[in-house]
């Protein structure tokens, strides 16, 4: 671009009505030509600079448009993230509330029933079995849930026909629940119901299954389990808790 403008201006200068020989032999004429050439070059440079500025402005406009689009995408993603985070926080809080509720109930149950039940059950249980069972249960009480699961599983392998076997399997399910491994909790408690349907731990196992289902978001499944608990074990303390949960407006 600069070269075309310069050439055009130089050609115009050369077309001035002066004799060619006199023009180039005259110092004044040469100075005028040199000055004109510099003006042409300066004008060409100015034109190129302005064109560059125009191109820069276009690039800036395009860049600004892209930045605005990115900002809009970022704002949208932040909104989605906030929604997901809120859902996760609510789910986590709900899970904690459920665990606190079941943990409180289990501790009360443990204090009110477990010693008497254990004493009654251990009347005909060898001392070695009782010691192994209590050692595993102590791990649960201390919050060492993984160790409790291993200890109770070892107990069941060693003493599969023990009168304490249903309770051992039941506490395995509770330990999984305490770890928020709800699928394993359901599977473990289902074994109690299947293998020992007439044991005192069976209705409590069903109640724990309902709690695990609720924690996983399967409210319909939890409701069906609670209804089944009430129908199958209507006189059990667990059935009373199930009825409260089934009451509209009651805390789940």
Image: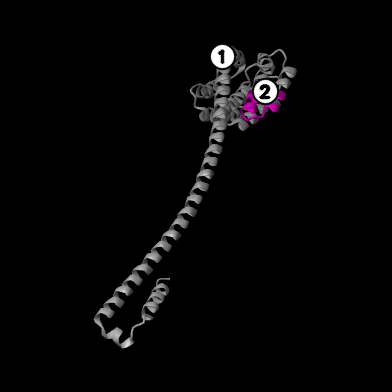
Q: Residue 167: x and y, percent? A: 61, 22
Residue 193 placement: quadrant: top right
Q: Is residue 71 left or right of residue 156?
A: left
Residue 111 placement: quadrant: top right
**Residue nearest the observer in this picture, 226 or 134:** 226
The numbered dot on residue 108 is 1
Q: Residue furthest front?
A: 17
SS assignment at label 2: helix
Q: Residue 242: x and y, percent? A: 67, 17
Q: Residue furthest bottom?
A: 21
Task: Say which quadrant the C terminus sits in.
Answer: top right
Q: Residue at x 31, y 72 (%)?
A: 38
Query: Which residues make up the magenta segment?
Result: 208-225
Q: Residue 11: x and y, percent? A: 39, 79
Q: Residue at x 65, y 25 (%)?
A: 209
Predominant SS along the magenta part: helix
Q: Residue at x 48, y 49 (%)?
A: 67
Mark 2 → mark 1, Cα distance in angstroms: 18 Å
- The answer to whether residue 100 is seen in the rendering is yes
Q: Is residue 222 magenta?
A: yes
Q: Residue at x 58, y 20 (%)?
A: 102
Q: Which residue is disc 2 drawn over?
A: 206
Q: Is residue 4 left or right of residue 104?
A: left
SS assignment at label 1: helix
Q: Is residue 155 above or below residue 243?
A: below
Residue 50 placement: quadrant: bottom left
Say whether disc 2 or disc 1 marks the residue closer to the N-terminus. 1
């Amino acid at each position: 671009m600069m070269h075309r403008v310069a050439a055009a201006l130089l050609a115009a200068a050369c077309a001035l009505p002066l004799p060619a020989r006199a023009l180039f032999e005259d110092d004044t004429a040469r100075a005028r030509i040199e000055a004109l050439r510099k003006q042409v070059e300066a004008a060409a440079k100015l034109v190129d600079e302005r064109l560059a500025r125009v191109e820069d402005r276009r690039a800036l406009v395009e860049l600004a448009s892209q930045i605005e689009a990115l900002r809009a995408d970022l704002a949208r993603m932040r909104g989605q993230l906030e929604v997901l985070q809120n859902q996760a926080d609510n789910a986590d809080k709900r899970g904690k509330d459920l665990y606190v509720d079941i943990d409180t109930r289990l501790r009360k149950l443990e204090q009110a029933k477990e010693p008497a039940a254990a004493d009654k059950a251990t009347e005909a249980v060898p001392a070695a079995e009782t010691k192994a069972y209590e050692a595993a249960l102590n791990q649960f009480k201390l919050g060492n849930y993984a160790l409790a699961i291993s200890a109770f599983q070892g107990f069941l392998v060693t003493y599969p026909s023990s009168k304490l076997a249903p309770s051992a399997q039941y506490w395995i399910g509770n330990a999984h629940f305490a770890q928020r491994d709800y699928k394993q909790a359901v599977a473990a408690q289902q074994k109690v119901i299947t293998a020992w349907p007439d044991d005192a731990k069976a209705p409590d196992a069903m109640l724990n299954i309902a709690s695990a289902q609720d924690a996983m978001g399967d409210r319909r499944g939890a409701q069906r389990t609670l209804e089944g608990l009430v129908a199958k074990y209507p006189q059990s303390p667990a059935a009373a808790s199930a009825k409260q949960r089934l009451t509209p407006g009651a805390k789940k």
